[in-house]
Amino acid sequence: MVQASAPGKCILFGEHAVVYGQPAVAVAIDQRMTVSLEISDVWRIDGMRFSPERHPHVESLKQRLWANGPSLSIKVNGDIPPASGLGSSAALSVAASAALRCARGRQIKDDDWGEGWTAARPNAVYTGPWDVEQGDSVQTGKDSVDVDECAILSHAVEASAQGGRASPLDSSTCSHGGCIVLSDKVESDLNWIYSRTLNDVSWEVHAVDLPKEIEDVWLVIGNTGIHAPTSEQVAKVARLLENEPGRMREIETIGIISRRGIAALKEGNMEGVGRAMSENHLLLRSIGVSCSELESLISAAAPSSLGVKLTGAGGGGCMIALTRNPKETSEAIELAGGRTLISKIAAHGLIVESDDNSPLWNPFE
Ligand code: MEV
């Protein structure tokens, strides 16, 4: 059996403003999605017949990595609540990309990749494998899996499932793990990883080395249980800016707050990080993406927290509290009617949990 897992994510700063080129920060959380694969007589997912319509992300990856491959039984497990702004679909796509790559291995040609997707060959991104011939070797098991490739594939399938509108924040965070910063320019004081372009929008993707002070704080995530599609919230902000162009000042202010948050995070100033989160929330509320349920969870968590805000697209979904007292904050949120999850900041990215009997299929034979 081949098995891979990937973490969910929380946005600390900059949701919505990132769509207009402002910086944004996300961290991987302890909650994960796990995908296991085994050869099977017919295509199955969680024991049921596989339906491409019900699982568009998996179908899209199957076409890219498993075209003409034998039937698989796919099992998906995880503790990331779906459609709540915590990156469950990106985590699923990253884990499924890794499992499928591990299950097929990778053709190596002249000591280089013979196929795959990599930021190092920008024109190959999203266009599929380049010329594959009978090569001299195949990389198998864990060695064949590449974090950047899983991030690229996850971004591509997220974008096609969301009608072309998706920043690479979720896919890169769920694949690389840790803390990821997106910006419209290369930030010299961060670790630049790669650029991503989609539909004429470009993002510079960076990783951040976090200081030891993050060991003393937790994120408590409060789920309202309300599903609000990201595309509707993004469209709502677009309408606001169209009708009142002066409101772009608020989007720019979110960018300024994100930069202040990044500086505080790098210095290990957790009080500063919390303050920037709460300020970020006031602007998100002002552009209309909060709701009364999020506000009551946020008010309940505030007294025991360093900072509180909604996370993700808003309109429902989740809020986060940065706290030194996770039990107290979690109880306050639960009393206000929210379901809580507790996470440390910046969990491990993609992990290949098992590569037993891989490759399950050799497409080059
Ligand atoms: C959603 O998780 C974050 C948004 O900024 C949309 C995006 O970045 O594509 C609202």
Image (tube, rainbow, N blue to C red):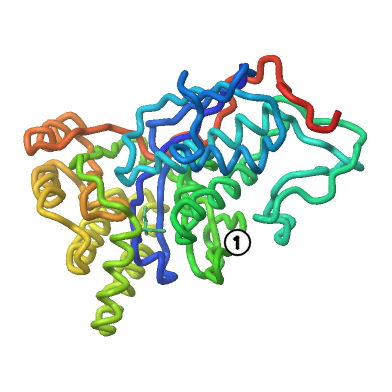
- Residue at image x 40%, y 60%? 24
- On the image, the x and y values in percent for residue 18 come to 40, 64
* Image: 23 above or below 80: below
Residue 261 located left or right of residue 34: left
Please name the residue shown 55% across and 27% down the image. Answer: 4
Question: Percent position (x, y) of residue 318?
Answer: 24, 45
**Relative image position of residue 321 (x, y in whole percent):** 22, 44
Side of 178 relative to 219 (left or right): right
Pointer 1 residue = 195
**299 over 40 or under it: above or below:** below
Which of the two residues, 305 or 184, is positioned nearer the viewer here? 184
Q: How many marks?
A: 1
Disc 1 packing (10 Å; few <14; some 14–19; many ≥20): some
- The picture quadrant where one finds residue 283 is bottom left
Q: Residue at x 59, y 26 (%)?
A: 352
Q: Is residue 284 left or right of residue 45?
A: left
Camera-side residue of 21 and 189: 21
Amino acid under disc 1:
Ser
> The C terminus lies in which quarter of the figure?
top right
Report if the beta carbon of the residue with label 1 is closer than 8 angstroms to ligand 1. no
Q: Secondary structure at mark 1?
A: strand
Q: Is residue 180 above or below residue 343?
A: below
Residue sitting at x 73%, y 45%: 116
